[in-house]
Amino acid sequence: MGINNNFKFECVHCGHCCTDLNTLVNTTYIDVLRIKNGLNLTIDEVLEILGFYVFDQAPSEKEIDRMVVPPIQTERGMAFTGLKKRLNGKCFFYDEAKERCSIYSFRPGFCRTFPFTFTIQKGKDKKTSEINIFYTDKGIQYCRGISEEYPTINLEQWIKLGRKVIQDLSKNNQLIKKWNNSVKNKQIIPSARNFIMTIFNLE
Ligand code: SF4
Ligand code: SF4
């Protein structure tokens, strides 16, 4: 894995990653399908839980290339998809009474990997790859589970998760590229509903 195993973390369920006003949970189409299947949602119901967050200023191609989850073309402009928030800024799926996620087994990759993020690095032989793991900025900012008091993480398990999430992101980004190209070539109408329908049809 090529990195030191010095991460001390244990989720203490402080809820900060689900309730922080400035944290938006990005979703891949794989996340959306998992939640849709887990909760047995219709297209309309998916549109109720999924936000299409439009950029104030359309990002350049270069900026898009650098994004972990690139935006899609919609009827209102370039937008990235993420879980909706309630008016108080908490995640739509945060159960305030129980102070827990109400869709824990279906939650998005972002929630599974928090407070970590991963990068992939091709090996010298170009055939193998290494996954590197880091704390996210937000994790460092507010995650109460990062502390010298807590046990060292099981690096192997986290790296396995990181690899899976990177694979999902890659599949997601290919789909978005295809979608945006089809919009550009006027082959599809760029509506949020159409996008969800396209995702549903992948199954
Ligand atoms: S989906 Fe669940 S874990 Fe993820 S932010 Fe929402 S409440 Fe938290
Ligand atoms: S911020 Fe950290 S400790 Fe708090 S719920 Fe999220 S992952 Fe767990």
Image (tube, rainbow, N blue to C red):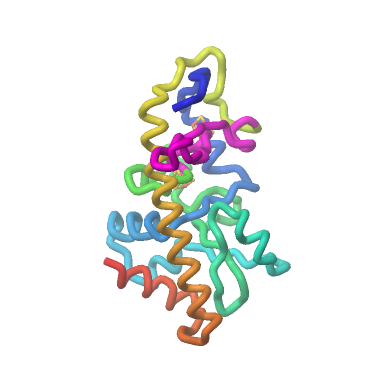
- The segment highlighted magenta reads 111-140
Q: Quadrant of residue 64?
A: bottom right
- Between 14 and 38, the residue placed more toward the observer is 38
In the rendered image of this protein, does residue 156 appear above or below residue 43? above
Residue 122: in magenta span: yes
Q: Residue at x 34, y 60 (%)?
A: 33
- In the rendering, at what x and y percent does residue 171 appear? 40, 57
- In the rendering, at what x and y percent does residue 166 appear? 44, 46
Q: Quadrant of residue 52?
A: bottom right
Q: Does the rendering let one see residue 41?
A: yes
For the N terminus, the quadrant is: top left
Q: Does the rendering let one see residue 100?
A: no
- In the rendering, at what x and y percent does residue 56 appear? 71, 67
Image-based side of 99 in relation to 21, left or right: left
Q: Residue furthest top?
A: 149
Q: Residue at x 60, y 59 (%)?
A: 65
